[in-house]
Amino acid sequence: MKEILNLRGSIVALATPFDRAGNIDYAALETLVKFHLENDTDGIVVCGTTGEASTLSDDEYREIVSFVVNKVDRIIPVIAGSGGNSTALTLAKSQIAIESGVDALLIVTPYYNKPNPRGMYEHYKYIAENVNIPIILYNVPSRTGSKLSAELTVRLGKEFPNIMGTKEATGDFNQMMEIINARPEGFKVYSGEDSLAVSMTAIGADGCISVAANIIPKEFSEMIHAGLNYDFERATKVLYKYLNLMNLNFIESNPIPVKTALYLMGMIQNEFRLPLAPLSSEANFEKLKIELQILSLINSQVVS
């Protein structure tokens, strides 16, 4: 099995750029990868929620993962989102990612099916026993309709050595503290919510898998590492500077706002895969544009 990652810090949940014809925009994708390699991002998650993974064909998935792995060229870890609501299909997608050379898998709890705790355990057990690569659990009940309990998270981490961490997007600090308090040695806990990431480092988390890092990779990395070093004066200074931007990233469903910001920054086209569509109101577009101008991420001449 691949060596278990000792990954701490700022991990970007990378957006997937499309061109006007609806195809993957690989020139823009290369620009995004280079942006992160030059701006202190510690790891890249490709084909996660922010990457619109559920809209990608198997061929596109394989091509994107391989492309990012090749462009990163072992400089930082690459983690592929490979979860789904079918255990068999989750394993098949995980195997595609492994063949493409990723360092770890991010596997969301099965959505729509709403498995009971036994089903949840058996799902992750089956995947863990059939792959030879580190796995990060992904707990985001607001999207999946089911929650991975702290007790089961810790059990999975203890029973399966390649289940090496969890991305917690529950907003439940008590759950996060229960996991951190009982986790096995080396088990990583990552914030799944940008605005809570500093607070999570204060209780022992290892970093954040971030949406905002798409836009402000260097600043977000500075914030997370300050928190990991218990320099909370510095960490909160960065947090409060960018807090409104972090919140605006969720003014509509992720990744619509963050991709709009990248478009305004001149990095990608303002294109999405249905059923996602561009921002639904001019008011939301203006709020995001004005905040980017305030933060000097775009200039005042940028127009819609």
Image (cartoon, helix red, strand yellow):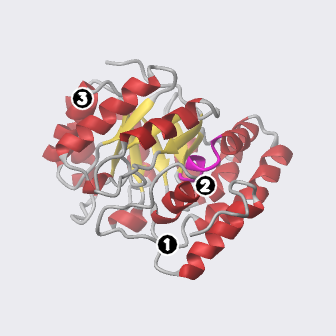
Nearer to us in this view, 188 or 65: 65
The residue range painted magenta reads 211-217
69 displayed left or right of 206: left
Quadrant location of the N terminus? top left
Q: What residue sits right under mark 2 in the picture?
A: 194
Q: Nearer the viewer, mark 1 or mark 3?
A: 1
Nearer to us in this view, 213 or 198: 213
Type of amino acid under label 3:
Val
The label shown at residue 131 is: 3
Q: Position of residue 143 (x, y in %)?
A: 38, 65
Q: Position of residue 230 (x, y in %)?
A: 78, 39
Q: What residue sits right under mark 1 in the picture?
A: 252
Q: Nearer the viewer, mark 3 or mark 2?
A: 2
Question: Relative to 261, is 56 above or below?
Answer: above
Q: Is the Cβ of the residue at disc 3 closer than 8 Å to that at disc 2?
A: no
Quadrant location of the C terminus? bottom right
Q: Position of residue 64 (x, y in %)?
A: 31, 38
The label shown at residue 276 is: none
Disc 3 crowd, CA 10 A, few/some/many (<14, 14-19, 20+): some
Q: Residue at x 34, y 31 (%)?
A: 67
Q: Nearer the viewer, mark 1 or mark 2?
A: 1
Q: Is residue 103 visible?
A: no
Q: Secondary structure at mark 2?
A: helix
